[in-house]
Image: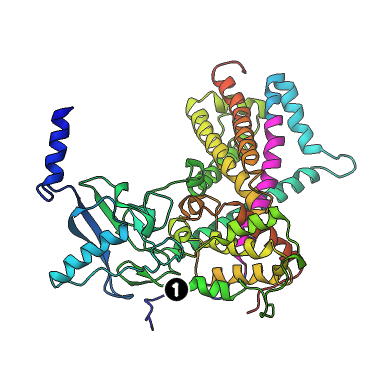
């Protein structure tokens, strides 16, 4: 039987295969997760008072001195993170577009049987998290959108920012989205890097939930402590 | 007690006195051909036995349509025993409907009298609609041609003990080999990815000694072919495995990824 195909859009031979893109996504994700662990530990310094927090912040900028001059280490970390963000974003957009091409016409009725809220919100959740990170850097690193401005100490900026309930709520929503992103991300990265199997599946899933919850709670601790006056 | 018995006896005694079958409203995707726009069309079927399979119910509808002089609904089917993988439609938004089985093994008792049932074809660029509910799944054949085989001389069956296979491996290989290539994984996947299908084949052949010589080339070429056919990428959501009539596990996908990354590191590249 000869079948005449409707305008069938098949990409030219894929230069980069979809699994390779997923591996890029997984590895860049792991780099960012490692950074987040260091980040949440640093945040908790806020409970040791202004001086400890500010000197920690100063230390980050001078790590490795005098062996490496000035802010070299800091910039290396920033560049690695930026590369990870760009790679993660590239892989996500590329796979998103591939998925759109793979099903241009959707179902009239479609029921999900297995997908979690976390896995469903990976793409738009990721976009919201990216927007949050930009705001977060402008607020607390550069002070551009912070009430205290860029002349202030990091601790002052922290307190000024989170005393505003709207900032704290935006932060909380973003961090919870991040937690869900990680819950599916950790499981997905394990699969993508070929490290999952039937025996490990449950452990990986439980670890992903535990890790994501712990990290989210760690990040929520400081802003809410500021909002409720435990840190001022 | 006595009254009920009496009532039952009387109903058995006069068959057809009351309709015991189900009355259903079907909304079916009708599309004349591959390049024609399709739409959902509503039909009514009456007196459907709960013991009928979903395909038999469609047969009843088609007889009705033929008697009315209408075009019957085109749908794929072959063995009707759940082993050939030909039948497969989206029923109320689920691949093969509410039970984790093939459409031919789905029975009307899974529905209630008076239900409205939506029936659509698999939707994926790589599975173009031929007519109504029938889609062209030859993209799967081409993925198999890209590497889903072993190159060995055939002839007299070799002595079974000549090549020992660990029980654990043969069991896992056989689980993966139960894939019937129905396409439900693609249909259910939010990305229209064929990953579970390809992973089942890669796992099946990659776990047995006969599959080893071509293991690296197989995975690289099959993945390249599935990308080329226009399937989406896997995001490990798990809709595929939950919709698979054979329950192929997500573990196979991890194994494919493991094999692929290893093969790429070892320098295997897809043949163009």
**B188 magenta-colored:** no
**Residue bearing mark 1:** A9
> What is the magenta segment's predominant secondary structure?
helix
**Residue sitting nearer the eye, B220 or A125:** B220
Q: Is residue A175 above or below residue B263?
A: above
Could you tell me which residue is drawn at 38 percent across and 78 percent down? A5
Asked if residue A87 can be seen in this view, the reply is: no
Image quarter of the C terminus of chain B:
bottom right
Query: In x, y percent, where is residue B157?
Result: 67, 74
Q: Is residue A51 left or right of residue B133?
A: right
Colouring rule applied to residues: rainbow
Residue A17 on the magenta segment = yes
Q: Is residue A51 visible?
A: yes
Q: In the depicted view, which residue is nearer to us: A205 or B206?
A: B206
Nearest to the observer: residue A24 or residue B218:
B218
Judging depth in this view, the residue of B261 and A81 nearest the camera is B261
Looking at the picture, how far across and down is residue B130, in whole percent?
35, 74
Circle 1 — which element? loop
Q: Is residue A8 above or below residue B189?
A: below
**Range of magenta residues:** A16-42
Q: Where, quadrant-wise, is the N terminus of chain B in this rendering? A: top left
Q: Is residue B215 left or right of residue B223?
A: right
């Amino acid at each position: 039987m000869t079948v005449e195909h409707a305008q069938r859009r098949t990409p030219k031979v894929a230069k980069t295969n979809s699994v390779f893109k997923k591996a890029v996504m997984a590895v860049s994700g792991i780099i960012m997760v490692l950074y987040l662990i260091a980040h949440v530990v640093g945040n908790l310094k806020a409970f040791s008072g202004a001086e400890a927090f500010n000197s920690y912040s100063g230390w980050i900028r001078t790590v490795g001195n005098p062996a490496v001059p000035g802010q070299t280490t800091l910039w290396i970390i920033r560049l690695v993170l930026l590369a990870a963000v760009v790679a993660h974003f590239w892989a996500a957009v590329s796979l998103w577009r591939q998925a759109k091409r793979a099903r241009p016409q959707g179902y009239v009725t479609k029921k999900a049987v297995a997908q979690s809220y976390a896995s469903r919100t990976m793409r738009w959740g990721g976009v919201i998290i990216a927007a949050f990170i930009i705001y977060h850097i402008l607020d607390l690193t550069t002070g551009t959108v912070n009430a205290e401005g860029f002349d202030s100490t990091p601790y002052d900026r922290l307190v000024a920012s989170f005393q505003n309930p709207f900032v704290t709520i935006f932060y909380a929503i973003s961090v919870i989205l991040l937690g869900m992103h990680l819950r599916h991300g950790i499981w997905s990265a394990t699969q993508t890097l070929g490290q999952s199997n039937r025996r490990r599946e449950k452990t990986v899933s439980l670890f992903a939930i535990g890790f994501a919850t712990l990290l989210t709670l760690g990040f929520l601790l400081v802003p809410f402590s500021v909002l409720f006056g435990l840190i001022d | 007690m006595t009254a009920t018995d009496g009532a039952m006896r009387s109903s058995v005694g006069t068959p057809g006195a009351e309709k015991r079958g189900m009355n259903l409203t079907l909304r079916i995707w009708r599309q004349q051909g591959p390049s024609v726009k399709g739409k959902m069309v509503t039909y009514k079927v009456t007196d459907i036995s709960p013991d009928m399979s979903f395909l038999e119910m469609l047969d009843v509808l088609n007889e009705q349509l033929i008697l009315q002089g209408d075009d019957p609904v085109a749908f794929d089917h072959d063995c009707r025993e759940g082993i050939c993988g030909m039948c497969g439609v989206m029923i109320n938004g689920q691949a093969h409907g509410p039970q984790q089985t093939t459409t031919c093994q789905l029975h009307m008792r899974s529905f209630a009298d008076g239900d409205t049932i939506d029936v659509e074809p698999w939707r994926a660029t790589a599975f173009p609609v031929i007519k109504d509910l029938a889609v062209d799944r030859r993209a799967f054949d081409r993925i198999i041609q890209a590497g889903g085989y072993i190159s060995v001389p055939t002839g007299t069956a070799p002595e079974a003990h000549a090549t020992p296979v660990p029980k654990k491996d043969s069991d896992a290989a056989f689980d993966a080999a139960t894939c019937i290539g129905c396409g439900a994984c693609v249909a259910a996947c939010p990305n229209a990815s064929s990953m579970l299908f390809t992973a089942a084949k890669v796992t099946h052949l990659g776990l047995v000694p006969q599959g080893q010589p071509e293991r690296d080339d197989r995975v690289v070429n099959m993945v390249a072919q599935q990308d080329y056919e226009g399937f989406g990428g896997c995001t490990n959501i798990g809709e595929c495995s939950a919709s698979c009539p054979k329950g192929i596990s997500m573990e196979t996908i991890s194994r494919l990824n493991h094999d692929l990354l290893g093969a790429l590191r070892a320098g295997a590249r897809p043949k163009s």
